[in-house]
Image: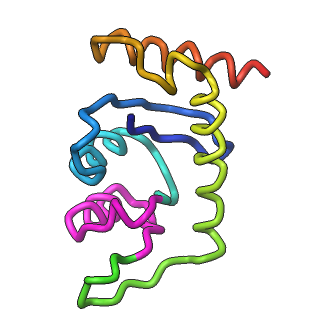
């Protein structure tokens, strides 16, 4: 499950993919068409192509660099701590058993369960 959240921690987009796929492969689809001043992501999303796309959309990339990168790139460490809001949201969504255990056999149904769980979390 990949997701994008807005500045207050509310989800704006979800994508369901195979668990063994790399996070960065789906990042472009997540941020495409989403207005943002800053895109905050973890090290799994560190790629020159993604950072270029973020900057082309007029946003700042707040992504720590992978340890094996040769060219350094600075990021705002204080702003990066805001990523915690998204992580807490995902944790609350995973408290719903059907999301945590992935009972659904099809991606369509699993995505529907994620939407329902997200709505329930936001209504609390």
Does 117 appear above or below 6?
above
Does 116 appear above or below 43?
above
90 on left or right of 53: right
23 on left or right of 42: left
The N terminus, quarter of image: top left
At x 46% / y 57%, what residue is drawn?
39
Does 75 appear above or below 3?
below
At x 66% / y 44%, what residue is drawn?
88
Q: Quadrant of residue 109?
A: top left
Residue 70 image position (x, y, % from top left): 24, 90
Residue 122 image position (x, y, % from top left): 70, 24
Does 51 appear above or below 15?
below
Callout count: 0
12 on left or right of 43: right
At x 41% / y 14%, what residue is drawn?
103
Tell me which colouring the rendered structure shows: rainbow
Magenta segment, which residues?
41-64
Residue 69 image position (x, y, % from top left): 26, 83
At x 49% / y 59%, what residue is drawn?
40
The C terminus, quarter of image: top right
Q: Quadrant of residue 11?
A: top right
């Amino acid at each position: 499950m990949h997701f994008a959240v807005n500045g207050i921690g509310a989800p704006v987009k979800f994508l369901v993919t195979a668990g063994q796929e790399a996070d960065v492969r789906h990042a472009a689809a997540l941020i495409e068409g989403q207005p943002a001043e800053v895109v905050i992501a973890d090290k799994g999303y560190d790629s020159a192509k993604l950072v270029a796309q973020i900057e082309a959309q007029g946003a700042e990339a707040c992504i720590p660099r992978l340890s094996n990168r040769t060219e350094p790139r600075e990021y705002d460490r204080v702003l990066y701590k805001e990523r915690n809001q998204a992580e807490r949201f995902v944790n609350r969504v995973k408290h719903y058993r059907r999301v945590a255990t992935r009972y659904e056999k099809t991606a369509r149904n699993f995505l529907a369960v994620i939407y329902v769980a997200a709505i329930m979390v936001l209504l609390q």
